[in-house]
Every structure is written in structure tokens, then in C-alpha cells.
Amino acid sequence: MKKDIILAGVGGQGIISMAAIIGLAALNRGMYLKQSEVHGMSQRGGDVMSNLRISDKPIYSDLIPCGQADLIISLEPMESLRYLPYLNPQGWLITNKAPFINIPNYPDLDSVYKEITKIEKHVLIPADTIAKEIGNDKVVNMIVLGASAPYLGFEKEEIQNAIRQMFKNKGEDALNQNLQAFEMGYNYKAS
């Protein structure tokens, strides 16, 4: 198995945590892993992107070439469009529907959605709305991770075990809310 994944969003949304969980699942399986991160502004609101490459064979570069990403997983719809040139023709785009409007000239949201829906294999998930149902807006990343899980090449339980590893020291409530969020994203079906 080989997967090249770009994770995108803005600072504070949990991109690095998502990359760490996928990475843990890969390491638990004994796979090779390379990761590279790009942070915009160090404060909340700057763009964040992570190249995550996992394979059962050695990986020689941590950067994903244009047109080679199997998945773009984004916590912000405009940020998902920024990395579209990296998506391969058979790749999946999974993104949160809610924008993080941190610039005065944020594009028209309907235009952003229109561009996303041009991608044949896409999931546009209302993760912020689902997080409100759970009662914790900090689990949006786990909802999007859940929606992405069927395309990652891991069994659902492998990702759940990695979430347990990641949150085991954060308390039972935090762990359970993150697992619940993952489950809700995993079971999301667009209407």
C-alpha cells in the first residue's frame, strides 16, 4: 500500500493532530512514513499544510509531487482548493464545508463549493454543524478524519486505535468525544 496525502487548513484547526493519528496508524502497521509540514503565520489563522506519505516500501522524499496526491483532506474549503494541482485524477478531496474567514477578500462561498463539486471524488462535510451536535467545536478535525477514513487504506479500527493512543492522556471525556466525532464523520452520508 502507498498513500500520498495532503492535509490542509489554518492554524489551530488540528491538521498536525490528524497527520499524527494517520502516522500512528501507519507505524502501528509497520509501514514507512515521511511527513513535511508548512506553517503560515505561527498564530492561529495562518495556513497550515502537511505532506504525509505512507507506504509498505521505503519512501525517499517527504514532498508530494504535483498531480500525485491520493487524497487532499482539508478543514477549510478554500484551503482545499489551494492544493488541487497536487491531486491525482483518481484522488479524493475531503473537506469541511464551513469556511474559516480570516482574510477580507475571502472568495464567494458558492463559487468555492462549485469548484469543489467539480471534483468527481469529493466529500463536502458539514463538520462544524456535526461538532455542535456533539457539543465540542474542537473535534471538527476528527469528524473530517472520520469522513476520510474509508479512503486512507486502513481498517476503521486501526484509525480508532491511533486516536486512543493520541488522546489516552487527555482524559476519558476528551477521548470519548474524539472517538464519537470520528464515528460521526465515518458514518456521514451526503444527502
Image (spheres, rainbow, N blue to C red):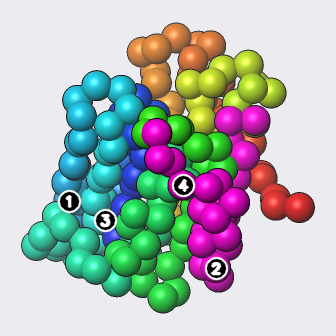
> Considering the numbered disc 3 on the image, is that residue within a helix, a strand or a loop?
strand
Q: Which residue lies at the image location 75% right of the left edge and 35% below the top edge? A: 129
The residue pinned by badge 2 equals: 118
Residue type, label 1:
Lys
> Residue 34, position in %: x, y?
20, 59
Determine the image quadrant of residue 113.
Answer: bottom right
Mark-to-mark CA distance, 1 and 4? 33 Å
Q: Which residues are magenta?
A: 104-129
Q: Residues within 10 Å of mark 3 (few under 14, many from 20)?
A: many
Q: Secondary structure at mark 4?
A: loop
x, y percent for residue 150: 62, 64
Q: Which residue is mark 4?
A: 107
Looking at the image, is mark 1 or mark 2 nearer the viewer?
Answer: 2
The amino acid sitting under disc 4 is Pro
Residue 137, given in percent of the width and then of the height, sits at 63, 24
Circle on res. 6? none
Vertical comparison of 108 with 3: above or below: above
Q: Nearer the viewer, residue 178 or 99?
A: 99
Q: Residues within 10 Å of mark 1 (few under 14, many from 20)?
A: some
